[in-house]
Amino acid sequence: MTSKRKVIYLVDDEDINLEIGKIALGESYQVVTFNSGKKLLEMLEKEVPDLVLLDVEMPQMNGYETVKAMKEDRKHDRVPVIFLTAKSDIKSEMEGLSLGATDYIYKPFSPPLLQKRIEVQLLIKEQKEELAHMNEHLQEMVDKKTQTVAELKNAVLKTMSELVEIRDGTTGGHIDRTQSYLRILIDALYEQKLYEEIVDTWDMELIFQSAQLHDVGKIAINDEILRKPGKLTAEEFAEIKKHTSFGEQVIEKIMENTKEKEFLENAKIFAASHHEKWDGTGYPRGLKEEEIPLQGRLLAIADVYDALVSSDRPYKEAFSHEKAVAIIIDSKGKNFEPKLVDLFLSVEDKFNQLADGFWG
């Protein structure tokens, strides 16, 4: 027995955009199209979809007016709305999000990116519905459903990290690999009793899960820059560097709507600090030495090692493990904390074995 397909309402005043949307999504979802916000609102009185894709610039009733009307009616105020628009200024995006939209995608959109964004919103919607159901029957369901909630959370995290990697076409698998390298470093940290007073306060599973979000800010970087196959210009690199600040802001926004602070605090630290350098020449804040959180100092080594040995970047050949180790040693006291470079050298054979497994 096949499960019923999710229903998506697509609203755009251009017939060609409606056709493109149906082609891009028709195999995965039941797509119903409307050429005006008014017709959408009329249909919502009869049937509520799983998600709405909404154009912003439409005559008579624009997207902002439409989503405002949607959110004023309790029958469909929880339906996730993703704006599809050619308007790429921050002011317009903030206006849409403040009115209740859950995401903002610029035209022309990438079909795989659109698919992944929809998956994220539907997963979040399912999680909210599951939690609401749990609250109604909490006493009898709490033990039974705890694992389900954890699996949903991990699914959302995994989907968000995959979303970043779909947009950044040169770094497939980077998040999983850096997570594995980070685990080696933290295990060694624990065994060697280095920074013991800090490490003892960490919930290790939360640390490793939260590291998945270290590049989440790349969601806000322009596709032309993020997916550029060649070397970046100085201006383009300056734009790429903003992903650390964007990631921090994204996670802070999530924190406003949840009580699970420890996990998100670690995620925010990883996002904001993994490109800081021991000598103070990193970004975004130019932190120096132990001003940089330990999580960021550790992930910096894992992140750079993976970038050096990765073979999926079209603008450079992968370095050998030995070359990568030499580069990290040369950066001792500059990019990386000396004690952590020594820690890395004590387990660099494990890095090599993992890299062989990934690329062998």
Image (cartoon, grey):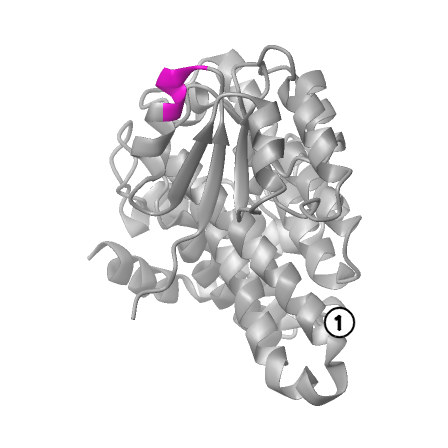
Q: Give the side of residue 237 with respect to residue 291, left or right.
A: left
Q: Is residue 84 left or right of residue 325?
A: right
Q: At which x and y percent is residue 25?
A: 35, 38
| Amino acid at pointer 1 | Thr
SS class of the residue under badge 1?
A: loop
Q: Which residues are magenta?
A: 14-18
**Is 232 on the left-hand or right-hand side of 287?**
left
The percent coordinates of residue 87 (x first, y second) are: 58, 14
Look at mark 1 in the image and give the residue it sits on.
201
Q: Quadrant of residue 27?
A: top left
- Asked if residue 286 is among those painted magenta in the image, a careful observer would answer no
**Residue at screen point 78% across, 38% down:** 72
Quarter that holds the N terminus: bottom left
Quadrant position of the C terminus in the picture: bottom left
Nearer-the-camera pick, 313 or 115? 115
Q: Is residue 183 left or right of residue 292?
A: left
Who is closer to the viewer here, 161 or 22?
22
Report whether residue 37 is seen. Answer: yes
Nearer to us in this view, 14 or 128: 14
Q: Nearer the viewer, residue 313 or 117?
A: 117
Q: Quadrant of residue 113?
A: top left
What residue is shown at x 44% (from left), y 24% (from top)?
Answer: 223
Q: Position of residue 3 (x, y in %)?
A: 36, 64
Secondary structure character of the magenta stretch overall: helix
Q: Which residue is at 58% across, 63% downward?
A: 153
Residue appearing at x 53%, y 49% in the figure = 50
Q: How many marks?
A: 1
Question: Callout 1: few (<14), some (14-19), or many (20+) C-alpha neighbours within 10 Å?
Answer: few
Q: Is residue 94 above or below residue 72?
A: above
Was residue 15 drawn as part of the magenta stretch in this picture? yes
Residue 292 seen from this side: no
Residue 58 % position (x, y) = 57, 14
